[in-house]
Amino acid sequence: MHLFAENLAVEICTYYRNLALAHGVIPKVFTMVNSEGDQYLFFIDDLGMDDSKASKFLTYIVQAHDAVCYARGTLVILDKTQQLIEFAVIDKDDDEAIVCSAELTRDMEERPIGLSEFEKTLAPKKTIYFSGLFELQNLSADLLEDFQDLWDEMKGKILHRTMGL
């Protein structure tokens, strides 16, 4: 497993903890790190696309920017009182993914008030629903151009930083 993937798992735990407890939001998050150590992070819902097109866009980003790993996370609602924040980190060269989960506690007004520690486990990458973003896909020239235009527009508005090598 690439060191970036392990670091990404630690960082996303902290990121979700801060979003949930300090801001009361638990968005669908996507982040990737390329071979140069550039990390990009954004909210999937901000794309304004259906799941199928969003998946194609995420695949485009992963492949066009030479990602070595990526993570995707969300809130899982089991019932009104039991909710989990879950994410998985997918490494390009590893058959296992890092899967992280923490239980979210809400008060009577449904505001987040507690978050357990994230439990980290390894799982076969092929069992993760969105683990196929490294698989090559054929996209039309128009769609590729649309995705590149969207990415160029987004880059100035999303979290971008460099992880140390």
Image: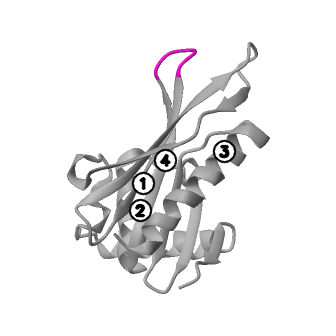
The residue carrying mark 3 is: 17
Front: mark 4 or 1: 4
Q: Dot 3 surroundings within 10 Å: few (below 14), some, or many (20 or more)?
A: many
The residue carrying mark 2 is: 58
Mark before the other along the chain sequence, 4 or 1: 1
In front here: 147 or 136? 136
Answer above or below: position of 47 versus 37: above
Rounded to the nearest whole Å, what is the CA distance between mark 1 and mark 3? 25 Å
Q: Position of residue 145 (x, y in %)?
A: 42, 76
Mark before the other along the chain sequence, 3 or 2: 3
Tag 2: amino acid: Leu
Q: Position of residue 125 (x, y in %)?
A: 25, 55
Tag 4: amino acid: Gly
Range shown magenta:
78-82
For the point 55% across and 58% down, the residue is 10
Q: Are marks 1 and 2 in contact (CB under 8 Å)?
A: yes
Query: Left or right: where does residue 55 sit relative to residue 38?
Result: left
Rounded to the nearest whole Å, what is the CA distance between mark 3 and mark 2? 24 Å
SS class, disc 2:
helix
Mark before the other along the chain sequence, 1 or 3: 3
Tag 1: amino acid: Ala
Front: mark 3 or 2: 3
Q: Position of residue 91 (x, y in %)?
A: 34, 66
Q: Position of residue 109 (x, y in %)?
A: 76, 16
